Structures are given as C-alpha cells and as structure tokens.
Amino acid sequence: GTSYSRKFNVSLLTLAILTGTVMTVIGNNIVLSLGMVGALSIVRFRTAIKDSRDTVFIFWAIAEGLSVGSQNFKLALITTLFIALFLGLTTYIPTIWTKYLIVISGESEKHMNLSEIRKRLKPHVVDIKLRTANTNSEHEEVIFEVRTKGELDLSIINQLSELEGVDSVNWIVESGETLG
C-alpha cells in the first residue's frame, strides 16, 4: 500500500510471542486446550477493532489468564515483563526516516516549475517522489512525498513559497496511521 503501519507490524510480532505463550501453557494437556477453545469462543468481536494494538491487548489478557489459571506463574510473569518491555521499546524508539507530504498549490496560468521545486527540496531531503498532480483551468496542485532524517527544516516552506506560480505550501507529517 501507499502507507506503512508500524503499529500493525509490532502487533504481528507481539501476537507471535503470545501464541507461543498459549502453546506453552496448553502443551499436551487436552483439558487446557478445550478450556482455551471455550475462552476464545467467549471473546466475540461484534464490532471491527480499528487499532491492531487493541487486538494485542485482548489476546495478551487471555494468554495471561490462561497462564495464571494453569498455575504457570513464572511464564505469566516472564511474558508480561517481556511484552511490556517490547511494546515500550517499539513505541518510544524513533524511526530512522521521517515521511512528509508537501502540498503545493498555484494558479494554472502561472505554471509551477516542478524541476525547480525538486531542486529546492533536494538539499533538505533524502528522497522525493511526486505522488499526485491535479490541474484544472484555474488551479493546479502537486503533492510530493519526501523522506528526511529528523525534522524537515521550516525554511524550505518559505523557499518554495517564493517560486513563481506557487500560492501556498502545506507540510504534513505522514505517519501511515489513519484516524476515525
């Protein structure tokens, strides 16, 4: 897709750890495996869960409940500490690249010079991709996706605004996550 969801990838890794925990608890015990089927049948998702981390927390609670219920207290403690540390680290460690969308609008009669826009962006970014170009008889708009190391320098907005044909420049951080 066009966006990368870091939270979803972290959720997949966490669910793999939780699945291993549940399999360790169940082992070869038929009674525990039937209890697990019963526990999972109780958890019914009547509405779609929008955030993948919510699914992780639901299954984490089930795995911990199974561990404690089968008197595997060490496994419950180790799993809790490991997953809490893993989620904490993946939440607070910053990504190497920061992705931004730069939306540039102008009048159609004063055409924007895309090569000049790229030339002004080049010293400030690692990668530039033209994602969208819209035009009609009165208005034209281009959207660039840029990647930087760290924050984008705000002075670039002023430099782009000074170009002929550019009326407005909007700078948007793209996290890959959707809201709503």
Image (tube, helix red, strand yellow):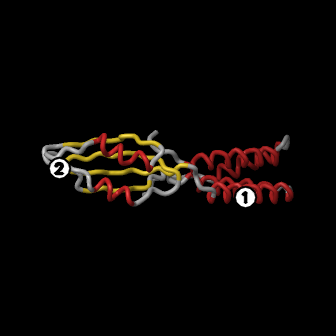
Along the horizontal axis of the image, is 56 left or right of 85? left
In the image, what residue type sits under mark 1? Leu
Name the residue nearer the viewer: 62 or 106. 106
Quadrant assignment, res 109: top left
Estimate the x, y position of residue 149 in percent, counting from the top left: 52, 51
Quadrant assignment, res 136: top left
Estimate the x, y position of residue 6 in percent, counting from the top left: 56, 49
Ranked by sequence position, the earlier of labels 1 and 2 is 1
Write down the residue under mark 2: 107
For the C terminus, which image quadrant? bottom left
Write down the residue under mark 1: 85
Q: Residue at x 30, y 43 (%)?
A: 116
Query: Can residue 150 be seen from the camera position used here?
Result: yes
Query: Can residue 68 be seen from the camera position used here?
Result: no
**Disc 1 to disc 2: CB gap under 8 Å:** no
Along the horizontal axis of the image, is 109 left or right of 76? left
Q: Nearer the viewer, mark 1 or mark 2?
A: 2
Q: Residue at x 67, y 59 (%)?
A: 88
Estimate the x, y position of residue 102 in percent, counting from the top left: 36, 51
Estimate the spatial distance between the alpha carbons at disc 1 and disc 2, rounded to whole Å.
Answer: 52 Å
* Element assignment for label 1: helix
Mark 1 neighbour density, 10 Å: few (under 14) some (14–19) many (20 or more): few
In the image, what residue type sits under mark 2? Glu
Along the horizontal axis of the image, is 123 left or right of 95? left
Name the residue nearer the viewer: 114 or 144. 114
Q: Residue at x 29, y 41 (%)?
A: 114
* Element assignment for label 2: strand
